[in-house]
Amino acid sequence: MKKIWSAVVLFGLSLPVLAQATEFQPIGSLGFGGAGVARNTGALTAYWNPAGGAFNDTPFAMYVGAGAGVRASNGLAENVDRLSGVDFDSINKFDSSKASSVGDMVKLLSTLEDAQKRNGNLSLGGEASLGFSIKHFSFGVFGNLEGYVQPNVDTTNILPTNVGGTTTTSVKDLYTSAVNTSPIPSTNTSGYFTNTQFNDLATRFSIASGVSGDPNYITTTQAGQLVNAITGSSQLQGSGIPASSTYSTLVNLATSMTSGSSAQTLGSTFNKNTSYVTTKYIDYVEVPFAYGHPFNFGKNGKLGIGATAKIISGNVSQSTIQLVNRPNDSSISAKDLMKDITKNSESSVNFGVDLGAMYKYDKWLTVGVVGKNLNSPRFAAPEYSVPVYNETTKTVDPQGGKKKGEDVVLKPQARAGVAVEPWKWLTLASDIDLTENDVVAPGSVVGSSAAKSRNFGGGAEIHPYSWLRVRGGAYKNLADSDVGMVVTGGVTLFLLDIDAAMATKTFKVSGSDVPQEAKVQVALSFAF
């Protein structure tokens, strides 16, 4: 399992792709904190704001560039290391003579519980762009890749089976395993659970063991010893797993083991567990043609109104990768995930419409607004397979179930921006999304509909010479409190633009702190 989860992380970090959603990629504006609605009046006009064409002051401009990045949320990343020491064979074939069996089981289940609650994920994306402008007209080719990797946890099939595999482990088996090494106190001594949580769990496990007189019955006092042993043997206090997740896990476990008798028959056992990762992405290429028309109001400034018509070719992929109970206990690698994410896809072609406006006052103040994909172009998703337990073969079949993937709709988006040039050598700019943008996440994944993107950012650029520009800024996703501020910076030397971004928040992978988000852009641009 350590290899499985490590592969998921390596997969995300190895792809040359960042976007959390079908959102504005900060093409040509990454170092500026992603602000471009009121700034871009050149070769990127067709992407950012068609109204910018009304202000193009050069006969011809060209831009060619590419961007790459990755983002990971704490919910997935923090649980990677927690699973590294779990012995999964001891879960499938529980040995009541080994105290570690209980610890491994509870640590695993608590980790999966926490991953599901916190909706952990990896999100991927990238862009490649070629833009041109000729006076008031602009056009180009803009390619985007936006994807999502998210675990789908099976919290139903969680009961371990005994070594023989014929019966489900009873509460007495758990007690015998956890308390067989040394005397364990029966009162709440660890401080991990509150007294209320501790007493509730002790009562639940005693009830789950049956009634007094049953050979597998344990008293409330013994159940208290079990709860304390679980807390210590699985090293939960040092694992970082919240007590709330472990409490919820143990409540579910005790409930699953309650049947009115001292032992269970085979039911929701771990050998039937179908936990998997769902991957979904869309790569699409826009070919826009834009025009911006100027309206001159003399001393009162100039207004530009623009429109973009674009052909969009989209390719949607959706698939699953089984995490546990894999055929022949096979391992999984980043290469396997790469192959899975690209092999199951469906292509379609649609068109899009953008409208924009831009107002410039006395050359130092510019305000812009744009609406993109106002006609909601839709791209079909393929049917995909999900793991299902086969009662005949007694194994989990990775191709056992079929689902129709959710189509990807590029919903209408609106963004506003402002740019100020107080001096010829300094530009200040800021953008904000007026709409919350949906993520390219599988709608069947619990909690995925809550993930949104609404960026607010900006920055400053110093340009003392035409061949030298230095910029810096920051942006924040206002719709996601789990993601911190992302700082940005960049430099232009002659025709070369280099920009980068890095989140201020980090998460741990194999003991090392890694930024939640990182991006880079490289481009060549010129105008004459």
Image (cartoon, rainbow, N blue to C red):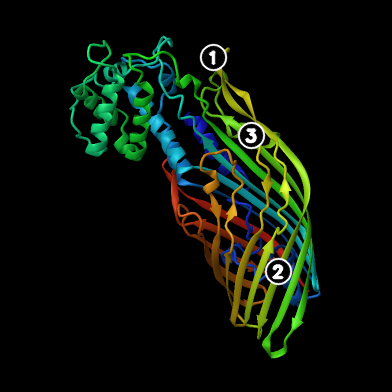
Location of residue 330 by image quarter: top right
Q: Is residue 37 left or right of residue 329?
A: right
Label 2 vs 3, first from the N-terminus: 3
The residue tagged 1 is: 394
The residue tagged 3 is: 319
Q: Kindly identify the amino acid type of the residue bearing the numbered disc 2.
A: Gly
Q: Secondary structure at mark 1?
A: loop
Front residue of 365/479: it is: 479
**Residue 504 screen position, x and y as percent:** 46, 57
Foreground disc of the pair 2, 3: 2
Location of residue 331 by image quarter: top right
**Residue 429 screen position, x and y as percent:** 58, 72
Q: Residue at x 64, y 51 (%)?
A: 126
CB contact under 8 Å: marks 2 and 3: no
Q: Secondary structure at mark 2?
A: strand
Count residues near mark 2 (Cα–Cα under 10 Å), then give few for <14, some for 14-19, many for 20+.
many
Label 1 vs 3, first from the N-terminus: 3
- Circle number at residue 356: 2
